[in-house]
Amino acid sequence: MTQVENKQAMHDTPFVPIEKIVALCKRRGFVYPNSEIYGGVAGIYDFGPLGVELRNNIRRFWWWSMVQMHDNVVGIEGAIITHPRVWEASGHIENFVDRLVDCKNCKRRFRIDHLPEENVIQNKCPNCGGELMEPRTFNLLMETYLGVVEGERMKTYLRGEACQNIYLDFDNVVKSSRMQIPFGICQIGKAFRNEVTPGNFLFRQREFEQWDLQFFVHSSEMQQWFDYWKEKRFEWYKGLINHKERLHFREHRPDELAHYARQAFDIEYQTILGWQEWEGIHWRQDWDLSRHSEYSGQDLSYVDQNTKERYIPWIVETSGGVDRTFLNLLIDAYEEEPDPSGKEARTVLRLHPTIAPVKVAVLPLQKNKEELVTAAKDIHKKLQRLMVSQYDEVANIGRRYRRQDEIGTPYCVTVDFQTLDDRTVTVRERDQMTQVRISIDELPLYLLERVTWH
Ligand code: GAP
């Protein structure tokens, strides 16, 4: 298949059912249900050997592009537990709520903001047509307690959004890193929400991970930086996916804006579940630093070193999910294509090589020929120092290629009898299944060039 035909094939691929992704994740060790032997916990998952590699690659790539590649951005890593007053100041205790209704007939529960408008107006269940009960309001913050002595224990919360640490540390970063506005602070970290309707696998969980950029600006430059980061983040996601047409922006209506946002755009990705939020770009204005100044009694204003103007910075936020990225990239990459030789279909994960959990698999043509095994193990040991490499000698070579295709390994190196004569190997590429013969000495550079982001 030529590259053009391949692109066309990707374009026309039907939406993959989530069940296929769930099954692949379990079968190949990407994701497991948490506490499965006890029946599991809704909305909480563990990541297996390949899952943790993929997650780390996703995180690393975000950090590299957002922190390392920007002189005006630095990173922090804040704690999950903070002073409880943080959540009063942030507005989460008052506003971080879901309004739910239960059906009197089929007993199903719905978030009101997820119901079709006509069902809300007619008070009718979208599942069975039954009557809906009075709506109830639930706060999503997860409570926890500090201290052991009854009566002295302090109630606090697992953070409901990871970004709060960034506002809490803003003044420390300015003073310790001598950052000057405009500048940004990034963080990747866990967040916890008592989602009343967790579901769709990793899409809506109770424990998940967010990445945030909070970019601090003077109000007069807010629009320009908002536009800048909005485009930048869109291009970032676009660069990682095959189905570019499945990505778009959606602006929030005034009635759906979060309590901290004056304006918001979601970067949405289209799957079998429809268009869904992947990352939010929020115009937070001076909400956060003003509120924390007010509630803590500490002045979080900033003094411009040149003009001596003192002001509360405005904030552009870009906030996305590591888990949604993990899920969307798997959905985007998954393809079942007919085998050119007419045998069983090939399942392939067309993940970007920079993100793929395993970069290369080294395969001796036969496992019962000692010289081939020794040469292959030697190559694997050398490559392992540079990238995640797997050695595999089990089953015929075609089957081993298929195993690697299914987990998205971009390159397979085969060691055959010619290797023993001239120190060359074949490198087989995952997407086009083309093979080239190159020398063992050139192999590390050849692979590094192809798995590194350019
Ligand atoms: N600080 C802003 C904030 O938290 P958000 O839109 O609630 O905004 C940002 O969350 C991102 O976090 C979402 O775009 C999504 O990728 C991810 N996210 C939110 N809730 C999630 C959940 N329950 N499970 C998995 N990811 C979630």
Image (cartoon, rainbow, N blue to C red):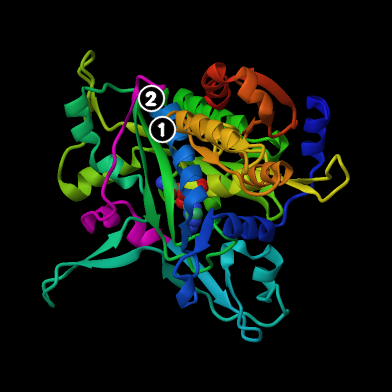
**Residue that badge 2 annotates:** 68
Q: Please give the range of residues in magenta.
A: 69-96
Which image quarter is the C terminus in?
top right
Q: Position of residue 99 (x, y in %)?
A: 50, 68
Relative depth, front residue between 446 and 92: 446
The crowding category of the residue bearing disc 2, from other C-alpha atoms within 10 Å (few below 14, some 14 to 19, many at least 20), is: some
The crowding category of the residue bearing disc 1, from other C-alpha atoms within 10 Å (few below 14, some 14 to 19, many at least 20), is: some
Q: Position of residue 69 (x, y in %)?
A: 41, 22
On the question of residue 219 being in view, the answer is yes
Q: Secondary structure at mark 1?
A: helix
- From what the image shows, is residue 107 above or below residue 446? below
Q: Is residue 261 left or right of residue 27?
A: left
- From what the image shows, is residue 119 above or below residue 219? below
Q: Position of residue 328 (x, y in %)?
A: 60, 46
Q: CA distance from mark 1 to mark 2?
A: 7 Å
Residue at the far right: name it.
Answer: 342
16 in the magenta segment: no
Q: Is residue 102 left or right of residue 74?
A: right
85 in the magenta segment: yes
Residue type beneath disc 2: Gln
**Residue that badge 1 annotates:** 63
Residue type beneath disc 1: Trp
Q: Tell me which residue sits at (45%, 25%) in the image.
A: 225
Q: Secondary structure at mark 2?
A: helix
Residue at the far top: name it.
Answer: 306
Mark 1 and mark 2 residues within 8 Å of each other at the beta carbon: yes
Question: What is the quadrant of residue 309 in the picture?
Answer: top left
